[in-house]
Structures are given as C-alpha cells and as structure tokens.
Amino acid sequence: MSLAAERRLLQAVVALACLVPLSVGGQSVLHGPGFLGHPPVIPTDLDSHFRYISGIFLGVGIAFASCVPRIEATGPRFRLLGALVVAGGLSRVVSLVAVGAPSPGHLFGFAMELGAVPLLMLWQAAFAHRWRAAH
C-alpha cells in the first residue's frame, strides 16, 4: 500500500473512531445519565460530575478529530490524547473489580479504550515515522 493510501486509511479510521466520543459525549452532556436510560441522578452533584466527565470526553473527541487532517504530524498530541483515553479505560478496570461488569455499551467503550486506541497510537506512530523517512 502506498503511503498516500495508508494516510487516507488512517485518517478515515481515526475519523470513524472519533464518532464515539463526539456522539456519546455530546448526548451525555445534553441529557445527562438519561442518555443511558437512567433516571435523573440524585444528588445533583453526581449529575454535574457525569456531565463534566462527558464534556471532557467530548473535548477529547474534538481534539482527536483535529489530528485527522495532518495525521502524520500530530504524534505528540495523538499520544497524549491516547494516554488520556487509556487512563480512563484503566479506571474502568477499577470499577469492574469493585462493582462488576458494566452494560454492553460501556464494555464497548472499554474495548475502544484499552484495545482500539492503543492500536491506533501504534499505527499513527509507525506511519508518521515512515512518512518522515519518505519526505
């Protein structure tokens, strides 16, 4: 595969992956835990915290999307964002051990955070190295 084709493929995969934090984060900010089919949270501090974390998730999605146009040149930002996502996934491990398995949607998030994102980080780094060597 040519570098140009791989670049387009990497951009497409990252853009597709960005749909998760953009859509879920946005819906969670707007609708709070109701987005997940749960009643309003009492006390309100938990709702506030849920929406705050959802806003961070949305922001991470926007930041990842900003990497797409120049995917070959955004390694440090991409790795920092990926590290944030992996840290969140590792935090889910704590929840898994402490209170049990979450719903299927959250298990999907878990797979993205500890599977897909690290693989994308490795792909982006390897691609950026090949891109720099060729240019």
Image (cartoon, rainbow, N blue to C red):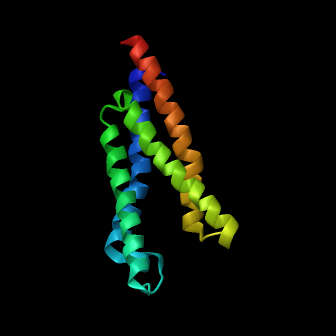
Q: Nearer the viewer, residue 111 or 79?
A: 79
Looking at the image, residue 100 lies above or below residue 92: below
Can see residue 78? yes
Relative horizontal placement of residue 102, taking residue 3 as reference (left or right) = right
What residue do we see at 44% from left, 84% from top? Answer: 41
Where's residue 86, x and y in %? 53, 49
Q: Nearer the viewer, residue 78 or 105?
A: 78
Relative horizontal placement of residue 114, taking residue 10 as reference (left or right) = right
Query: How many labels, in total?
Result: 0
State the image quarter where residue 57 is shown.
bottom left
Can see residue 2? no
The image quadrant where one finds the C terminus is top left
Q: Nearer the viewer, residue 134 or 92?
A: 92
What residue do we see at 62% from left, 66% from top? Answer: 95
Where's residue 65, x and y in %? 33, 45
Where's residue 16, x and y in %? 41, 48
Q: Nearer the viewer, residue 29 or 13?
A: 29
State the image quarter where residue 74 is shown.
top left
What residue do we see at 51% from left, 32% from top? Answer: 123
Looking at the image, residue 103 lies above or below residue 81: below
Where's residue 36, x and y in %? 47, 76
State the image quarter where residue 14 is shown.
top left
What residue do we see at 44% from left, 87% from top? Answer: 42
Looking at the image, residue 87 lies above or below residue 118: below
Relative horizontal placement of residue 118, taking residue 100 as reference (left or right) = left
